[in-house]
Amino acid sequence: METLQSTELFAPPAREVYTVSRLNREVRALLDRGFPALWLEGEISNLSRPRSGHLYFTLKDADAQLRCAMFRMRNVLLNFAPKDGMQVQLRGRVSLYEPRGDYQFIVETMEEAGDGHLRRAFEALKKRLEAEGLFDPANKKPLPDTPHRIGVITSPTGAALRDILHILRRRYPAAAVLVYPVPVQGAAAAADIARMIRLADRRQECDVLILARGGGSLEDLWAFNEEAVARAIFDCRLPLVAGVGHETDVTIADFAADRRAPTPSGAAELVSPDGAALLARLAALEMRLARRLRERLAQQARQLAFLRTRLQQQHPARRLQQHQQRLDELGGRLERAQGHLLRHARARLAAAGAALRRHTPDHRLRQSTLQLAHLRGRLRRAMTRKLDQQRSRLGSLGRALHAVSPLATLERGYAIVMRARDGQVVRSAAGVRPGEQIEARLARGHLRCTVDESVPTGAAAPEKLCRPAPSSRGRGPAPVPARTAKKGKP
């Protein structure tokens, strides 16, 4: 009994064996909890865009590289098209792709490196000015409760001024508004803004100032990130509220100002008070609301802590991302399988074509071609004989036609006489008057003549019945070119 107890006391502990899936899952949980969201900068390479809409690429620098994934719900917000060789800045978190055990970076935000350069300059200036005390809350001036005149430093044509005037007119119409016009964008905008702040401070015309501009990119808002503007705000003796850009836009001017508003409209609300009755009512409601909120927040905080613990253990969005990445991998395998099937089908098609060529009907075509050539020769010879027969018959008919043709009569020395004025054939001497023009058609050519005398039938014929018409040059009768007889006349 004592030996058994001694053996149990010094026995080695039971071995705990991990599966690969469990190890990868716990490593991924450690990476997710151990690394907060961070920024990376590098060059994109091996960029892939599957049909799912996700982006997969490698981020590299001179010494190392890292696999990255940016899911579709994030990359649809990009305002540029990523491509290989592009220098970018990424914000995201470190994770692990469990099916392959790949260490990767899940990208939530991507910016071009140029914007990242501005952000680094922004952070450097912010740290330096903060170290000098320009952002110290102890130096912030309180806003007046009831300002009589409000100064607005902004572009006179921008939408920010219209929003401010609308809010002031609605909330506090008793206050006068004085506009200090400045450009709010461009290379010279910062110097103009700083000069206008110092001018307003020197004149002391207003109780409070609003520095405002509408939203835009980091480059558009860069005039409000210049050191000259920050120092002019810090030196200003008047309380100044900065309302630059949208709620998510943060500039150096916001830190240097006495109060920061999320928008130009918010700045107008900060400097414009409401009535006393409204303030009293709001104070009572605020106390009730604060009490209820504290109770509610305490309850929600407890519930949120409980839910956060459960969510961290098994987050559905992260599992969905894992499945989406696995789906992309299976999609690639499917495409490769389809390519293999297509190559196999092409090989079968080539084999069928070879078999078809072995049974080609070329021999029958050659026989048919020879037979066609033989029949074509017979047809040509028959056509030649038929044409010779028709030519012989046509010649005989032509000779018979020529024998009875009036042209044959003209060949024997006769002529056809016609009146020149109407082309009528003259059959009797009584039909022509002396001096009238006539034409005589011969076997070859025409004669145009003038009648000197008309001798009726039975009278003695004179030696010369007519004479040729004189030519235009006076050298005897002019030859008359042959012309086509009118229809129905010889």
Image (spheres, rainbow, N blue to C red):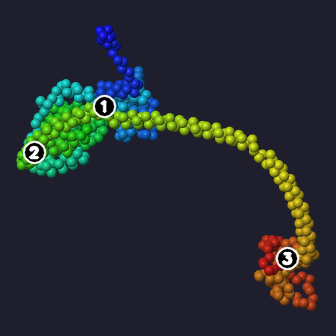
Give the position of the N terminus as an image quadrant.
top left
* Tag 1: amino acid: Gln
Q: Provide residue 407's location: percent of width, then percent of height.
A: 88, 75
> As drawn, is 286 to the left or to the right of 78?
left
Give the position of the C terminus as an image quadrant.
bottom right
Say which of 432 and 77 sits in front: 77
Q: Which residue is mark 3?
A: 441
Q: What residue lies at 36% left-to-right and 38% top-to-bottom?
A: 74
Pick whichever of labels 1 and 3 is earlier in the sequence: 1
Q: Is residue 83 above or below residue 169?
A: above
Element at badge 1?
helix
Residue 285: mark in rendering: 2
Closest to the camera, between mark 1 and mark 3, is 1
Q: Provide residue 303's location: percent of width, then percent of height.
A: 21, 36
> As drawn, is 403 to the left or to the right of 13?
right
Pick whichever of labels 1 and 2 is earlier in the sequence: 2
Residue 97: mark in rendering: none
